[in-house]
Image: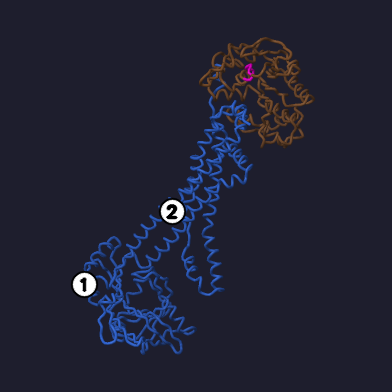
Amino acid sequence: MSPEKEFFREKPMPNLLRTIQLAMKSLLLHKLRSGLTMLGIVFGVFSVIAMLAIGRGASEQAQAQVLKLGATNIIIRSDKPPKESAVNSGGGSVLRYGLLRKDFALLEKTVPTVSQAIPIREMNKAARHKDREVTARIVGCTADYTGINDLHMAQGRFLSDEDRQQKKNICVLASGTADELFQYENPVGQSVKIADRYYSIVGVTMPRQASAAIGGSMSGQNYDLDIYIPLETMRVRMGDLNIDRSTGSFSAEYWELSQITLRVTSQDLVLQTANVIRETMKQNHKSDGDYSIVVPLELLKQAEQIRVIFNVVLGSIAAISLLVGGIGIMNIMLATVTERTREIGIRRALGAKRHDITVQFLTETVVLAGTGGLIGIGLGLATPLAFALIRAVVQRLNVAGGQSASEFSQMFAEMNPTPVPASLPLAFFISVGIGVMFGMYPALAAAKLDPIEALRHE
Amino acid sequence: MELAAQVTDLQKHYDLGSVVVKALRGVTIDFPKGDFVAIMGSSGSGKSTLLNLLGALDRPTFGEYTIGGIPVSSISDDDLSAIRNEMIGFIFQSYNLIPQYTVVENIEVPLHYRKGYPPISNEDKQHIEHLAETVGLGDRLDHRPYQLSGGQQQRVAIARALVNDPQIILADEPTGNLDSATEAEIMGMLLKLNAEGRTIIMVTHEDEVAKLAKRQIFMKDGVVAGEGIFPGKAHA
């Protein structure tokens, strides 16, 4: 082998660890500058992770609420009809709510993919026991109600078909109602007074989580203060007309059923069945203004779509922030290259190849961006803690300052950010990628310097 | 006679667009091993251009340059870097230390660019300390350049130039920024290195300094005007 061949044999990559150490050293020389340069990336990555976590937390909660309604369920609710449809009689008016018993009969008979249909009727009435009174949601329902709502008994039994057929004066209390009316007593076997009639208590249910809002209502449904009585009993004892005389004249609501919950045989058939039901309902209703059909599965899909849009918007914001951060880094690195022209000349004179200089400055940028990314990830992971802290502080303020902040605290109580595991490596690699992207030009500019010129640089 | 380096009809032209400046117009010099040459000449004589070419920092427009038997005139930029790293030690007028590095780290820099990028071994560290002691800085290993006097900085530069055990030391006005006492010290070191067998090529315009070399080459207008000392001429 000729001496030149021998001399110029292959050139491996510079030792990576040493290059990184070198980069760290240079960056630590200007701690403030490096820190400030990193900030763009830190905030970019932080916002990506925090926002994804908040978005995921919110959507998980929404999903859980929707699933509480049942993915295979279709819910038809009576709506308050428009005012002008009220039938005037004397000094008051009667509002006719939408769902009718014949709707229920029709649906149960004609839609083949429905495995279960449960009608309920709700009204708010005062329930009394001795000197305690509570305004409860009286729910007229059937024996199937527990199954479809995932409701479990804490004590006693739920209503049976027999109770319904015999129109018995019995009831089951929700846990909240039981606590309110029978603080330390066992309610089973005792009775409550609802609208001048006594109902004996046969059971108490376990607490039940609130479900997602359905129909037009914005707030979730709270089931704490329920009292369940047989549907037929409700019809016989309380009638379909609910008269409110409190305001001088009277207003009345005519109300046969407030809700029909239909369980579809399989999840694949839910959307088709929903369409069939929409058509079927038109037979008994000229307009669809007095009832609404809620399909939890559709809600879930809508929530999914909203989440996608949400992520796209957040992604664009984060991308802009990262872009700005990258440009900031590039700017500083260009200034650094100019500032260290002499050093580059010295290194070149002492044997550094162009490649070595490129690697040196590129590594500095990547270390800078990567460190920024890691700090951002750390901050992002701390988001749930920050929320917990805010919750705690707001709660304390609430205790001190009354109700004023309660809505605010509710908002935070419902937000439960959950970091998305995949977003962590993704964010890190994006920040490293930004380091490479925006560090390449300054590094190449540094390597391109003529060693003689660079050595003369003052 | 074995040659450490040889230049044959070396020409360097700078194309400035409107005019072509011929900084070197054909320089032929042999540098035998163990030589100590002072290159003299006024500014614009081409001595700096010659030194840059000898230092493999640049490539000639025409002509041949071999160092240690390897022709360097037309090799790639990376190969020039390798030549600088292994065969040449630089000593500059303004020391050119890296300001944020300590004495040890400055001496270490050429080792980072060695062929194959081997890690710095314990032997390397001992070698660096030994070099620092040789140039009289054994007690200042952790000092940074701004904590050192000019003479001390130049001694760090000498240690750095020696770390890869090069055949040729190129010194560009090594004593230009130093007082006469320090100048004597630095020149003493160069003479000692030369006595140990290293080839030294030094650019200077001081007759006193040039006198210490074995040979003086006087340059003018891009050619070798003669050998020997021409009193006063270098200052023009």
Q: Secondary structure at mark 2?
A: helix
Query: Which amino acid, mark 1?
Result: Lys
The x and y percentages for residue A33 are: 60, 45
Chain colored blue: A
Q: Relative to B101, is A160 on the left or the right?
A: left
Q: Nearer the viewer, residue A260 or B35?
A: B35
Mark 1 neighbour density, 10 Å: few (under 14) some (14–19) many (20 or more): few
The dominant secondary structure in magenta is loop
Mark 1 — residue? Answer: A286
Q: Kindly indicate whether the residue at mark 1 contacts the one at mark 2 (C-beta within 8 angstroms).
A: no
The one nearer the camera, B128 or B25, is B25
Q: Is residue B231 above or below residue A71?
A: above
Q: Please determine whether, in this image, residue B133 is positioned above or below residue A37.
A: above
Q: Eyeballing the image, is B110 above or below A39?
A: above
Kindly identify the amino acid type of the residue bearing the numbered disc 2. Leu
Rendering coords of residue B147 (x, y %): 73, 36
Residues behind callouts 2 and 1 on a single chain: yes
The residue that label 2 is drawn on is A314
Instruction: Report x, y in % for residue B85.
Output: 61, 25
Q: What is the residue that sits farthest to the right in this orientation?
A: B181
The quadrant in which the C terminus of chain A is found is: top right
The residue lying furthest to the front in this view is B18
In this picture, which residue range is highlighted in magenta? B44-48
Chain B drawn in what color? brown
